[in-house]
C-alpha cells in the first residue's frame, strides 16, 4: 500500500540514537552506528522521531510500504527490548551472588531515563531536557560509587564523559544544552583525581556562558568509593 512513512538520510545521521529512543513503536534501531528503519510495519507515520533528530536526517515520504501492524508492536513491547544502541536492555536484571546456602538473585533496577548518555552523542535540544534536573558525571564515578543509580541518576537526565579520554572541551556543548533548555538544576559528580577537574570546569563555564542562575553542586568521589564532599 502507498502510505506516509519516515525516511532516514544515512549521510546526515550522526549515530546519536535519539530517534530510536523517541520511537515508541521500536521501528528504528542502530545498525553499525547509524539509525535504520528496520521494521516498516512498526512505523505508524506520526513522526515522534523527527523532532528528536539533531541533524535533520529524518523526513517523511509517501511510498509503497507494509501497513502499520499495531498488534505486532504491542507484542514486541511485552518482550525484552534492546536499547537503541543495540545493547541488551538493562531496565530490569538480576545480580547473582554465591552464598554458602547457594545462589540468590537480587533484582536491580536501572534509574536511567534517557539514551544516549555520552556528552559527545547526546542531542542539545531533546524533549527530555525540558524541566530536567541535569546530572553531569565523569565516566568512572558510576563504577567507583556503588549506589550511583539510586543516589545520582534517579530523577535526573544523565550526561557522562571523560575529558582526558575524549580530549575535548565539553563547554560549548553543555552551554547549548543549559542555555537552550529549561534546566532546573545541575549536579556534577567527579572523581578526586586531577583529570576530572576538566568536567567540573566545563560545567562552571557553561553555566556562566548560559547567563542563567541555576542551582548546582559538585560531588567528589574518592578512588575507594566514598563521597568526599
Image: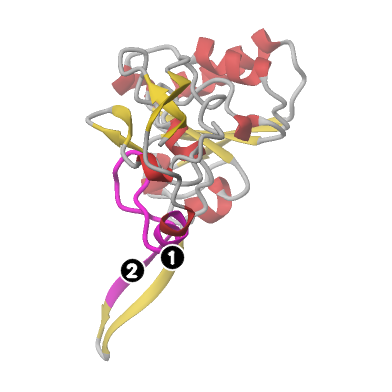
Tell whether label 2 touches label 1 (CB within 8 Å): yes
- Residue located at (43% from left, 55% from top): 146
**Highlighted magenta segment, given as a residue range:** 73-97
| Closer to the camera in the image, 90 or 100 | 90
Which residue is at the front of the view, 142 or 30?
30
Magenta segment: does it hold 157?
no
Q: What residue is drawn where x is 42% and y is 17%?
A: 57
Q: Position of residue 128 (x, y in %)?
A: 61, 35
Q: Which of 75 and 97 is in front in this view?
A: 75
Mark-to-mark CA distance, 1 and 2: 7 Å
Which residue appears at 34% of the width and 42% of the height? Answer: 39
Pointer 2: what residue?
95
Q: Name the residue under label 1.
A: 108
Q: In which quarter of the image is the C terminus?
A: top right
The answer to whether 93 appears left or right of 228 in the picture is left
The quadrant holding residue 9 is top left
Query: What residue do we see at 33% from left, 68% from top?
Result: 95
- Which quarter of the figure has residue 28? top left
Amino acid at each position: 500500500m502507498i502510505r506516509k512513512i519516515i525516511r532516514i538520510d544515512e549521510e546526515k545521521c550522526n549515530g546519536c540514537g535519539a530517534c530510536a529512543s523517541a520511537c515508541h513503536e521500536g521501528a528504528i534501531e542502530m545498525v553499525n552506528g547509524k539509525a535504520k528503519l528496520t521494521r516498516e510495519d512498526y512505523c505508524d507515520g506520526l513522526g515522534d522521531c523527527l523532532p528528536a533528530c539533531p541533524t535533520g536526517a529524518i523526513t517523511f515520504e509517501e511510498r509503497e510500504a507494509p501497513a502499520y501492524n499495531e498488534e505486532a508492536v504491542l507484542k514486541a513491547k511485552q518482550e525484552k527490548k534492546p536499547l537503541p544502541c543495540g545493547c541488551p536492555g538493562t531496565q530490569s536484571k538480576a545480580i547473582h551472588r554465591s552464598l554458602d546456602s547457594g545462589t540468590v538473585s537480587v533484582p536491580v533496577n536501572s534509574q536511567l531515563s534517557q539514551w544516549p548518555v555520552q556528552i559527545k552523542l547526546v542531542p542539545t535540544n531533546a524533549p527530555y531536557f525540558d524541566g530536567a534536573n541535569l546530572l553531569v558525571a565523569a565516566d568512572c564515578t558510576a563504577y567507583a560509587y556503588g549506589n550511583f543509580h539510586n543516589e545520582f541518576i534517579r530523577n535526573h537526565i544523565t550526561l557522562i564523559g571523560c575529558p582526558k579520554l575524549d580530549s575535548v572541551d565539553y563547554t560549548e556543548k553543555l552551554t547549548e544544552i543549559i542555555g537552550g533548555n529549561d534546566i532546573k538544576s545541575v549536579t556534577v559528580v567527579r572523581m578526586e583525581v586531577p583529570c576530572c577537574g576538566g568536567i567540573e570546569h566545563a560545567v562552571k563555564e557553561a553555566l556562566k556562558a548560559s547567563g542563567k542562575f541555576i542551582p548546582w553542586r559538585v560531588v567528589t568521589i574518592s578512588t575507594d568509593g566514598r563521597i568526599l564532599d
